[in-house]
Amino acid sequence: MSLYKRKDSPFYWMRFPAIKGELKPLQISSGTANKRQAQQLHDKIKAERWDLDKLDLKPKRTWDDAVEKWLLETCANRNHENDKRTLALLHPLLGGKVLDDIDRALLDAIRAKRAKVVKLPTVNRNMALIRAVLNKACNEWEWIERVPKVGMYKQGGGRIRSLTREEFARLLRELPPHLADMALFSVATGLRRSNVTQLKWSQVSLERRHLWVAAKDHKNGAPHSVPLNDAAMQVLEKRKGDHPTYVFTYEGQAMVQTSNTAWYAALKRAGIEDFRWHDLRHTFATWHRQAGTPTYELQRLGGWKSQSMVERYAHLAPEGLQAAASRLDNVLSVTY
């Protein structure tokens, strides 16, 4: 019998013979104890399976199907938890939608709705994730024939906020020792916050003055090697012996949050406004450019994926092009 009850369930269950591409019969719950409703669902699924088997039609996949498969296939990715949170936020806007019905108009409406509650960079990240899921559904899973255009908001070159040497010195004096060490190490190495807070001694070689970040822990998805300058080495020597596993700890525990009450209080006492922890990385890049570090070297030191991401700091050291501009002096001298 294809519609039946089980002792371990209050619902009616359905059993269908295997169709093309399946190795065994399909047994699923109807999700209802009402026999009439269960029979209606049974007849609907039976008809759909006949179409799939006899007419070679593709099943109508939904956004929820795609999200489930995406999260399953990307569970080892560094951004997996962030993706889960973002997809949960997008569920009220896309949940239950058949993938073939997701078009440019719907995506533009979603983009506009998200822009009312979050900033444009966050909206663009949301839309990029939607696009990535749809691309998988089209190009790898072959669930849909095409991916609609996913519009993005235009943004400027990105926020660049850095400290002067004097400001940074004031901030270090106001920070508690564990945060001061982390801030100094961040500016010395250019590492992102998560790579500093989760840094382990197993990643560090004091003898070789070197540390490394595994691809799975690095934002650009590639392993990152970091040479250690004197400032970074001094911090590591100071922290050595505090904890057997983690470099930076507070009261014996690994660090999780840096932008806390102590951080904001120190900024206020130091007279520094509009400054985030990530801006320590901007400070690292700014000081390097001002010191004459070439773009290709800064890209490798900071672990940026592309040179274009480093070029936004180029204007900070215009004197670096002075020698090049002066090469025409001899040629042009004959005209004046």
Image (cartoon, rainbow, N blue to C red):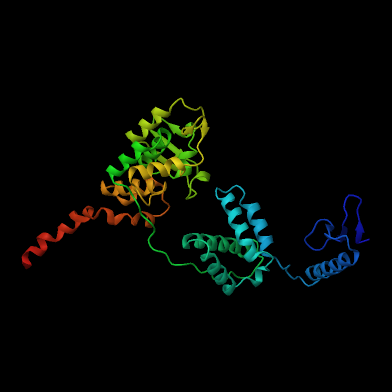
Displayed quadrant of residue 233: top left
Q: Residue furthest right?
A: 1
Q: Name the residue located 50 percent from the left edge and 38 percent from the top edge.
A: 198
Query: Which residue is located at x 48 percent, y 33 percent?
Result: 249
**In the displayed structure, would residue 68 be above or below residue 267?**
below
The quadrant of the rendering that contains the C terminus is: bottom left
Left or right: 268 with respect to 87? Answer: left
Measured as percent of width and height from the top left, residue 257 is found at: 49, 42
Counting from the top left corner in percent of width and height, residue 172 is at 35, 38
Q: Where on the picture, by quarter, is residue 47?
A: bottom right
125 left or right, relative to 35: left
Front residue of this view, candidates 145 and 4: 4
Q: Residue at x 41, y 49 (%)?
A: 276
Residue at the spot 39% in from the left edge and 63% down from the top edge: 156
Residue 208 x %, y % = 39, 31
Q: Residue furthest bottom?
A: 105
Which of the two residues, 99 or 266, is positioned nearer the viewer here? Answer: 266
